[in-house]
Image (tube, grey):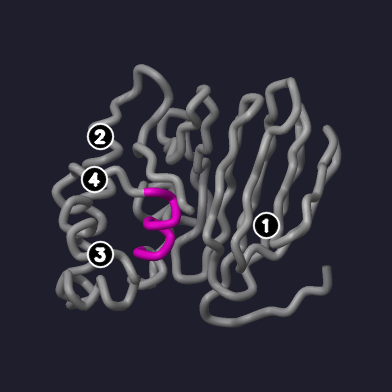
Amino acid sequence: MDRKVNISTEPGADVERVSATVSQNLRNFRRQSSLTLDELSRRSGVSKGMLVEIEKGTANPSIAILCKTAAALGVSVADFVNVAPSVPARIVQAHDASTLWRGPKGGSATLLVGTHGPDMIELWRWTMFPGEMFESSGHSPGTLELINVEAGELTLKLADTDLVVQPGSSVLARTEDRHAYLNCGVEELRFIMAVAELQRTRMRFEL
């Protein structure tokens, strides 16, 4: 089950600013696509009530909900939070990155930078404390994740398989089905993750 979490930034940052950005961008993207809330709900599989609350800036959508809504609009999650550069090169400052998941013990998942949708590549920084877990219902067909573990030990659950990734090691995984990240160790876990979700041209990779 996807965890319902607050859209938040690092402690002390302007949480309302991030929520307002997502709210405004969802409204703008929907209107540019000439979609009603009912139509967007049908395309994305996200309830109309949730979409209304997001546009009002009062919802706590999960990362999965943002991904589904972005895909239905032909944009990326990075477009939602304004970390998708529109020029050949642009620095995304640390204070512009958006933390979109908070774990019960203080862990976090921060979207650092990403491309415009619908073809999207995103770069994330994750921190998970012992006992924390994040579950995902899966992404669109062909989605790949590349992960490098900087500290601690990552348990990556894919279907019925558990992969244990040690510090300094990397993994390439297809994450179109349900999967989860867990910190089953006793130390803080830190990893960097790149996500490639290609909507227009499906590419096949041998893992």
Q: Are marks 3 and 2 in contact (CB under 8 Å)?
A: no
Magenta part of the protein: which range? 62-69
Instruction: Name the secondary structure under disc 4.
Output: loop
Q: Which residue is mark 1?
A: 145
**Front label number (1 vs 2):** 1
- Mark sitting on residue 186: none
Whichever of labels 4 and 3 marks the residue nearer the N terminus, that label is 3
Distance of mark 1 from mark 2, alpha carbons?
29 Å
**Front label number (3 vs 1):** 3
Q: Which residue is mark 4?
A: 59
Q: Which residue is mark 3?
A: 47
* Furthest residue in direction bottom, as rendered: 201
191 to 152, vertically: above or below:
below
Write the residue at 45% across / 71% down.
118
Residue type indicated by callout 2: Arg
Residue type indicated by callout 4: Ala
Instruction: Name the secondary structure under disc 1.
Output: strand
Corner quadrant of residue 134: top right
- Mark sitting on residue 17: 2
Whichever of labels 4 and 1 marks the residue nearer the N terminus, that label is 4
Corner quadrant of residue 86: bottom left
